[in-house]
């Protein structure tokens, strides 16, 4: 396993319940919209990649035949299976998003939410999604995205890496669309929204020490006027209260 994936396992095995309870992961209105956009059918078999706290699987499972929830981290998967033990059509599989252990053309839909920024090779992930989807199958992807401006994107990915050592890179919407085009996934719908984080809960969820927290804060506050404005850094003195990032939702269909 490469270093990036080892970091992901280490990070998400520490406190898997925090991702179940996180307001950002559990309460966002995009979960309802995800189901609406997918328009799932009762006969469907769905794959949820990097399921984390299982929020997508939980919302989709009442509308489909089966959901296969995968994650790279065993502790995360075990914790999620306990939380969702009453849902008997969800099956849990330890799996790498970039090397899915499923046959070609297996799934009617594939979902992945707030996870791809942890993937070292997103191109491999998208290729795998396309491979396991049936012709005409749907892919729903939701993730934090970087601005197209390289200066703003670099600032964002740096503070995310300082906060969370398992963070690899947030792609821009332009980069995601190119990956979809390269893998026979036709864009059907997209939406970008601003997502506001309460700073203390955001930074404490992934940092281990006060020193790490200080590095995150100091770097963010060192941003240019343009960077501070774009990410809506709300502060008082040296205290940061909130920040805002972009999140995109994509619905694609695999070419028949």
Image (cartoon, rainbow, N blue to C red):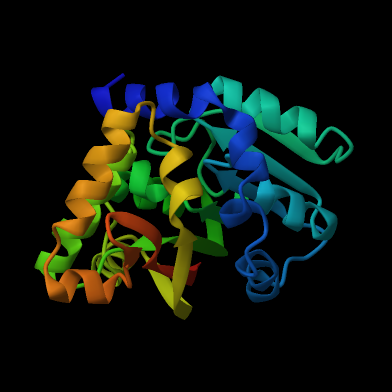
Q: Tell me which residue sits at (61%, 47%) in the image.
A: 22
Q: Residue 40 in the image: x percent, y percent?
A: 73, 66
Examine the image and state in which quarter residue 118 appears.
top left
Q: 191 or 218: which is nearer to us? A: 218
Between 253 and 26, the residue placed more toward the observer is: 26
Give the vertical position of 102 relative to 40 (above or below). Answer: above
Q: Residue at x 60, y 47 (%)?
A: 48
Q: Is residue 229 visible?
A: yes
Q: Position of residue 184 (x, y in %)?
A: 37, 65
Query: On screen, 72 above or below 120?
Result: above
Of the pair 26 and 32, the residue shown nearer to us: 26
- The quadrant of the rendering that contains the N terminus is top left
Give the image quarter of residue 243: bottom left
Look at 81% across and 51% down and name the residue there.
Answer: 65
Residue 57 position in % (x across, y down): 70, 48
Q: Position of residue 169 (x, y in %)?
A: 26, 49
């Amino acid at each position: 396993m490469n270093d990036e994936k080892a970091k992901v396992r280490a990070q998400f095995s520490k406190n898997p319940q925090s991702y179940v309870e996180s307001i950002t992961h559990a309460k966002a209105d995009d979960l309802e919209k995800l189901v609406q956009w997918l328009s799932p059918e009762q006969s469907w078999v769905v794959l949820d990649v990097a399921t984390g706290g299982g929020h997508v699987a939980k919302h989709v499972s009442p509308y489909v035949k089966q959901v296969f929830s995968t994650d790279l981290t065993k502790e995360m998967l075990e914790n999620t299976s306990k939380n969702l033990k009453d849902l008997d059509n969800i099956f849990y599989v330890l799996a790498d998003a970039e090397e899915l252990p499923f046959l070609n053309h297996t799934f009617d839909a594939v979902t992945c939410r707030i996870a791809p920024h942890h993937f070292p090779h997103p191109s491999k992930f998208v290729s795998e999604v396309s491979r396991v989807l049936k012709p005409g199958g749907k892919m729903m992807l939701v993730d934090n995205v970087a601005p197209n401006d390289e200066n703003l994107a670099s600032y964002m990915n740096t503070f995310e890496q300082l906060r969370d050592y398992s963070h690899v890179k947030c792609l821009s919407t332009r980069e995601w669309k190119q990956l979809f085009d390269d893998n026979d996934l036709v864009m059907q719908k997209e939406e970008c929204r601003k997502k506001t984080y309460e700073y203390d809960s955001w930074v404490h969820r992934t940092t281990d020490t006060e020193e790490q927290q200080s590095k995150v804060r100091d770097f963010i506050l060192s941003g240019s006027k343009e960077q501070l404005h774009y990410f809506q850094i709300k502060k008082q003195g040296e205290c940061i209260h909130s920040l805002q990032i972009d999140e995109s939702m994509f619905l694609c269909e695999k070419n028949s």
